Image (cartoon, rainbow, N blue to C red):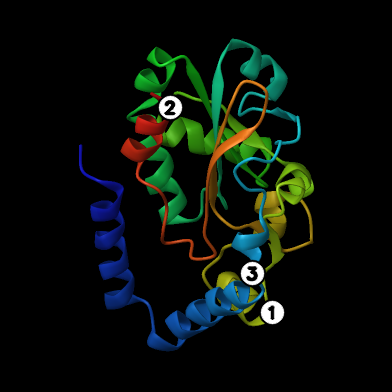
Amino acid sequence: MRSLREIFAERKEKIAQYVPAETQVVHQRVIAELRSQGLAANALAAGEKAPPFTLPDQNAKPICSDDLLSRGRLVVCFFRGRWDPFCCGQLEAMNQIVSAIQDAGGSLVAISPQTVKQSFFMADQHRLGFPVLSDKGNAVARQFRLVYRVPDEQQAIYRRAFINLPFTNGDESWELPIPATYFLNRDATILYRSANEDYTERPEPAEILDRLR
């Protein structure tokens, strides 16, 4: 299995080749602004308790974190949406280790603000073997202190690329979570956190699995 770093390197190379330079500058400026605000640094961190949540999966079935934690430890991936190739790459890579996570006594869920319908399309297209949860209005992501509003200049870029967040997420907020991966102990204590304002950087699945074991 290729590393996520290798997969992302290929996608970054394509972006550098095909995305206009001025568009790339805007995305980098937004990342820099979010970093200056300390968004990732202020997210829930190791040692803190994760809030309980109940969210619908891709089949509209309610999934409760307390139920999952009663059976073992929990890996939670916050992602932006199925329109983001880096989010798709991460979840495809995590999908490769679902069985190993379960064998180690854990569970995996992924959370985004997209609608249940969008989560269904994503899970079906990428054949994901874990719950893809819809966090309407970023209610849970907000409790993890991950949420930001997409700046106007980036909104314009997304609209030109037919990334319609109001449609995808079912609200007009233009809010997203920064990508973040959490590993929770059975009492909901956070054992590990990886949060990054740069959506092109995610932790390696093998690293998550090593921590779970």
Q: Position of residue 48 (x, y in %)?
A: 69, 41
Relative horizontal placement of residue 46, taking residue 151 as reference (left or right): left
Question: As rendered, which of 85 and 206 lies closer to the eye?
Answer: 206
Q: Which element carries disc 1, helix, strand or loop?
A: helix
Residue identified by numbered label 1: 152
The mark that comes first in sequence, 2 or 3, is 3
Q: Quadrant of the N terminus?
A: top left
Task: Give the residue at x 48% y 61%.
Answer: 199
Amino acid carrying label 3: it is Gly
Task: Give the residue at x 60% y 61%.
Answer: 40
Residue 17 location, quadrant: bottom left
Q: Position of residue 14 (x, y in %)?
A: 28, 68
Label 1 packing within 10 angstroms: few (<14), some (14-19), many (20+): few
Residue identified by numbered label 2: 212
Q: CA distance from mark 1 to mark 3?
A: 20 Å
Residue 172, labelled with which disc?
Answer: none
Q: Which element carries disc 3, helix, strand or loop?
A: loop
Q: CA distance from mark 2 to mark 3?
A: 28 Å
The mark that comes first in sequence, 1 or 3, is 3
Residue 38, labelled with which disc?
Answer: 3
Residue 73 location, quadrant: top right
User: Can you see residue 64?
Assistant: no
Q: CA distance from mark 1 to mark 2?
A: 40 Å
Label 3 packing within 10 angstroms: few (<14), some (14-19), many (20+): few
Q: Position of residue 184 (x, y in %)?
A: 58, 31
The mark that comes first in sequence, 1 or 2, is 1
Label 2 packing within 10 angstroms: few (<14), some (14-19), many (20+): many
Task: Give the residue at x 65% y 51%.
Answer: 168
